[in-house]
Every structure is written in C-alpha cells, then in structure tokens.
Image (cartoon, rainbow, N blue to C red):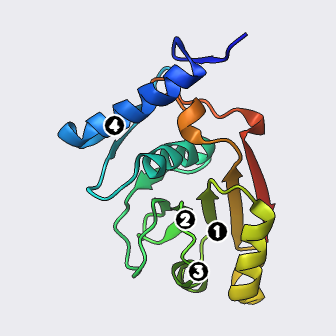
Amino acid sequence: MSASAGGHSLSEATWYHRDMISSSDVQGQVRFRFGRRDQLVLYKHKDESPRHLLLKAAAYALFYREHELKADAKLRFKRPADLAAVDLTGEPTFWVVVDDLNLAHLEYTCRHVHAPVVLVLQEPDLDAVVALIRKNIHYKHTHRHLTVYNFVQPVEDWLDPEQVEIPPASYDVFHF
C-alpha cells in the first residue's frame, strides 16, 4: 500500500510539490491552504529554496492558531524573523526562525528578542543540533527562551500546499 498526498503517490507528490514551488518563480508566490477557510500566500524570494518555503508553511501550520503570525514582518531588529506575531506597539510576541543554523544569527535573536524564539529545522540529528547550540550560545540566552522543532521527514515528501496538515509524528521538539 502506498501513501498518498493530494491524490498522488508519495514519490509523485514529492515531485509535484517540488515542481509547484519551482514553477512559482514565474509568479513569485505560493498559496498554502489550512483547513477550509485559512490560507497563507508566501512570496518566494529570489534565493529562497523550496525546502525553506515549505518549512515556513509547516511552521505557520504549527502556530497560526495560537499566534497571529505574519510572514516577513518588518521589525526593528537586525536579523529578520521568518514568521512573527506582533503586539499593538509593534513589539514581537512570538518569533520563528526557519532553517537557519547560523549560530551568530541565532545568538543575536536570542539576546535581543524578548519574545519566545522558535527554530524550525529539518536536520537528521536533533541531538547534534542541541549540542551545537549549547556549545556555542550561552545558557542565559536560550534557557526558557528557545525551542527547536525539527521535522524528521523531508517536508517536500508530505506537505501538500493545497491542504497543509502536520502529521503528529513528523517532528521532534526540544525546549531549552
């Protein structure tokens, strides 16, 4: 029995989603649907990978019910968030970094953003990522402030832009 996504076999779905994201270069945007009413349109930046775009949509799906997330919110920080929730004063209340393990950038974000910071990744070994962060970023900047969500299966294998659903066993979480 083969798994399917959007009426395609899993391997067909992978190519279908990759082609859909790649073909968005012409239009520069990809629409993701969440349930019957909710949707998100992401504009693909010139150097943005399909994986980054899909991980951003997956991160949005994880948190949009709890936070009013905005993609590429304009904030006063040197390092931009991929997704952020902002209060009425323009201060971030929730900050999401997608697929960026640049430790200098992550440390800057953890030091300067007072909202909870979530790092969304797709790495083969979450323990190695946690060890790398612990080794290079001081405890006082991550403790009770940083959470890592790591997708264990490639998002392009299962994420269908027409109906974004996050399988419960598709990611691991580590709270610092």
Secondary structure under the numbered disc 4 in the rendered image: strand
Upstream in the sequence, badge 4 or badge 1? 4
Upstream in the sequence, badge 3 or badge 2? 2
Position above or below: 36 against 76: above
Secondary structure under the numbered disc 2 in the rendered image: strand
Q: Is residue 90 left or right of residue 85?
A: left
Badge 3 crowding class, 10 Å Cα cut-off, few under 14, some 14 to 19, many 20 or more, is few
Mark 4 = which residue?
30
Upstream in the sequence, badge 4 or badge 3? 4
Upstream in the sequence, badge 3 or badge 1? 3
Q: Tell me which residue sits at (57%, 77%) in the image.
A: 106
Q: Is residue 45 left or right of residue 57?
A: left
Q: Amino acid at mark 1?
A: Pro
Residue situated in front as seen by the camera: 129 or 62: 129
Mark 3 = which residue?
103
| Image depth: mark 4 or mark 1 in front | 4
| Image depth: mark 3 or mark 1 in front | 3
As measured in the structure, the alpha-carbon distance from the residue carrying label 2 to the one carrying label 4 is 22 Å
Q: Amino acid at mark 3?
A: Leu
Instruction: Return the x and y of residue 64 as percentages of the image width and height.
Output: 55, 44
Question: Which label is found at residue 95?
Answer: 2
Question: Which label is found at residue 116?
Answer: 1
As measured in the structure, the alpha-carbon distance from the residue carrying label 4 to the one carrying label 1 is 27 Å
Question: Which label is found at residue 33?
Answer: none
Q: Tell me which residue sits at (56%, 24%) in the image.
A: 11
Q: Tell me which residue sits at (62%, 44%) in the image.
A: 62
